[in-house]
Amino acid sequence: MAANGSEIIAVADIGGTHARFALAGIDRDAGPELGEAVVLRTADYPDLASAYEAFADQIEGARPRRASFALACPIRGETLKFTNNPWTLRPKTLAAELGLDEVRLLNDFGAVAHAAAKADLSCFSHICGPDRPPRSGVISILGPGTGLGVAQLILDADDHRVVETEGGHIDFAPHDAFEDGLLVRLREKFGRVSIERVVSGPGLEEIFAALSDAEPPDAPALWAAAIAGTDDVARAALERFCACLGAVAGDLALVHGAEAVILAGGLAPRIAPLLAESRFAERFVAKGRYREMMANIPIWMIVHPQPGLFGAAAAFRP
């Protein structure tokens, strides 16, 4: 897979629902070369070590000695706890547990930001705003999946810096009477309400329940009906979801001082065709006196098939 002089490492992108693994070729003078991804459900494995072993059993030839893992949790402290799955791990002992010499860890959306810095422009799709490629300045990276990931990318012609954040856990800010009611409903259920409670996979279920005052279908069926438009309430819930995503993207762009926004995450590609016809762009620019400034911020989507894995490889330094 890799050229002469490069190293083969293991890379992983561990989220709330899926654990993705692959081999990657790393070379100082070229971008990473990613092998075929192995996607496992986190619910099928008691911990990261058992999921990694299931992946490693599929490797032909010698197993890699080093790895780079992107994790859906803050990379701080002696014990890491995933935000949306029950796994925990200890960074100091992880390499030994996996039979590796070294494991480098980074946040999952930090990895997406590294991918955005290194991916070819063909890996991006324009959503709205000026058709200006996201290739310089401060860029906000965000995206809904099982949770809501957020990172900041500072990019120039020669290098880049990634700031990992837990921005998905800032407070949810309603924009109208319906969202006022949604906030009250969610506060009764959860206490504090973060934007992740609304703009994430489970968030669509909460919006559906608030619209219909009924229990939503199971999550896969709800998302399928919403995207296909086969259920009016599900579709209305998704339209509201897109509006809230636009508002959140605009808030984060203001916080970061962003010159561009890149959408990512497991759900973003599925709803990409709907964003243009939704209130996403309207709510993105609806920032009062800063409306004109917001209208000049381009919004793109990264469409690389495995941005977390590619980013974990791109962040690795030989």
Image: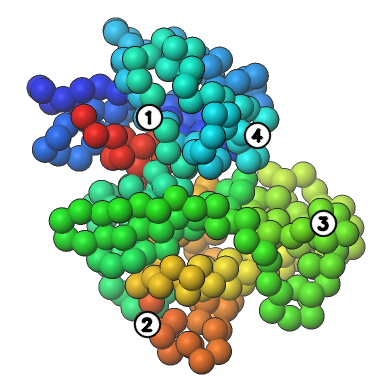
Q: Which label belongs to residue 191?
A: 3
Give the CA distance from mark 3 to mark 2.
37 Å
Circle 1: element type: strand
Please, what is the three-letter code of the amino acid marked with disc 2? Answer: Asn
Residue 2, compared with residue 162, is above or below; it is above
Give the CA distance from mark 3 to mark 4.
20 Å
> Visible in this render: residue 42?
no
Tell me where residue 56 appears, x and y as whole percent. Answer: 42, 14
Tag 4 residue? 85
Nearest-to-viewer mark from 1 and 2: 1
Q: Which label belongs to residue 296?
A: 2
Location of residue 138 (image quadrant): bottom left
Give the CA distance from mark 1 to mark 2.
37 Å
How packed is label 2: few (under 14 Cα within 10 Å), some, or many (20 or more)?
Answer: some
Location of residue 126 (image quadrant): bottom left
Tell me where residue 22 appears, x and y as whole percent. Answer: 38, 26
Question: From the viewer's perspective, is 50 left or right of 25?
Answer: right
Please, what is the three-letter code of the amino acid marked with disc 4? Answer: Asn
